[in-house]
Image: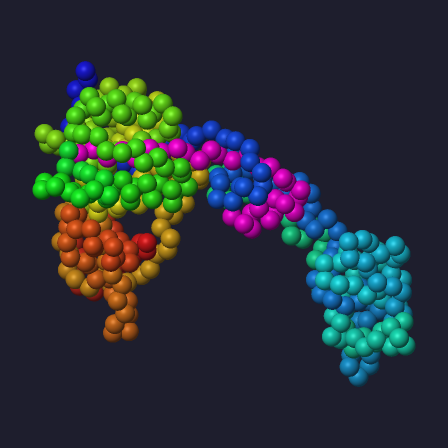
Amino acid sequence: MAKPASLTLIPPDEARRVLGDTPPVGRERVALGAAVGRVLAQAFAAPADLPAERRAVMDGYAVRGADVRGASALSPVTLAVTGTVPMGDVFPRGVGAWDAVAIATGGFLPEGADAVVMVEHTTALDGGTRVEVSRAVAPGANVVERGEDLARGAAVLPAGRRLRPQDLAMLATFGVTTVDVHRRPRVAVLSTGNELVDPAETPRPGQVRDANQTALGAQVIAAGCDATYAGIVADDATTLRRAIARLLDDHDAVILSGGSSIGTKDVSADALADLEPPGILFHGIDIRPGKPTLFARAGGKPVVGMPGFPTSSLIVFDVFIRPMLWRLGGEGARDPWRARRAARIGREYRSVVGREDYLRVRLVERDGGVWAEPLPGGSATLSNVVFADGLVRVDAAVPGLAVGDPVEVLLY
């Protein structure tokens, strides 16, 4: 048996680099209506001009701009109405000098017309056979030109984009009915620890309910993956090794909860020592909380050993593992945070140079500004992430924060 890696801390940016090298899963073709939230596997360019022809953007009359250039309320111009543009069809004739054709929003502009007079600036005469125009319009007014939205060949959707409803609308506009997307990664979440019991059970003295598996599974699903809740295994390297091997057979990644610290009952590193190469890539990140995080790869499949405390696990997932799962699912790089907000720190905090810290904070408005108040409790305290509005990252080069220092809050 290979010797398991010991806890050797690597810089957070190095951990991000290693996690970012995770190869994506394969692709599949799905119906357009089922593609929302899926990751596009191939870039999409406009196959034709959009719109394909000039169209009206207002209800009114299609005219030649030159005919009404001098129109005003005091000196209106009268035109002959030669017909109406039928919705869903084109007008069969052109627009000649001093002619007007009634048109609705979205209608295709007839040949010869180059502008649309809004209906509000017209008055119908003689039962609608003539129209009086009381405002001038220049050529192109109230008209969207051919290719004005998108020209043929224009880049529209890059590969690696998580598709939104508006993206599907664009694809449907061009007649796309099926889409090549990456498979949803299948991720197994497995808890380790003799002290753990299912949340439905009543713990005996010395036992605790397993909260991490529930939280991690929910985070996996929120990251766009399919989660398998794989249960609890005892603190035994052989049992854990067999469970991991079984899960790797039909999953794209395995996340272990607990068992990654260095101690007599922390067995993840031992169990992962014989993984298919490249094996364990790091065991320990210079962060707080979450220092004992372990990452390995069995072939192209990630295996993560998470810290045992729920607060540490939740933060490590948000900061490091969620972007890795996005990459596994084929998604391009993007900001892992919903939003960021500037604030001032409400309490002094001392850090250690070289270590990246994550403070759980609550936002409070006072004295005309926004303050980030650090919440009490360490990594063993779950309530401080429950009550937190977000996290403040204390950079590794910063020795600490003084009251009133400006900070950026990474919002949940």
* Residue 174 magenta: yes
Rendered residue at 27%/40% (across/down): 213
Above-or-below relation of 94 to 159: below
- Quarter of the figure that contains the C terminus: bottom left
User: Residue 34: which quarter of the image?
Assistant: top right
Q: Is residue 146 visible?
A: yes
* Residue closest to the eye, 171 or 381: 381
* Residue closest to the eye, 209 or 353: 209
Residue 261 falls left or right of residue 366: left
Q: Is residue 10 visible?
A: no
Task: Point out residue 301 in the picture as x, y percentages from the top left corner.
Answer: 35, 27
Rendered residue at 34%/30% (across/down): 253
User: Residue 84: which quarter of the image?
Assistant: bottom right
Task: Point out residue 144 in the picture as x, y percentages from the top left corner.
Answer: 70, 57
Residue 245 falls left or right of residue 259: right
Q: What span is colored magenta in the figure?
A: 164-193
Above-or-below relation of 72 to 386: below
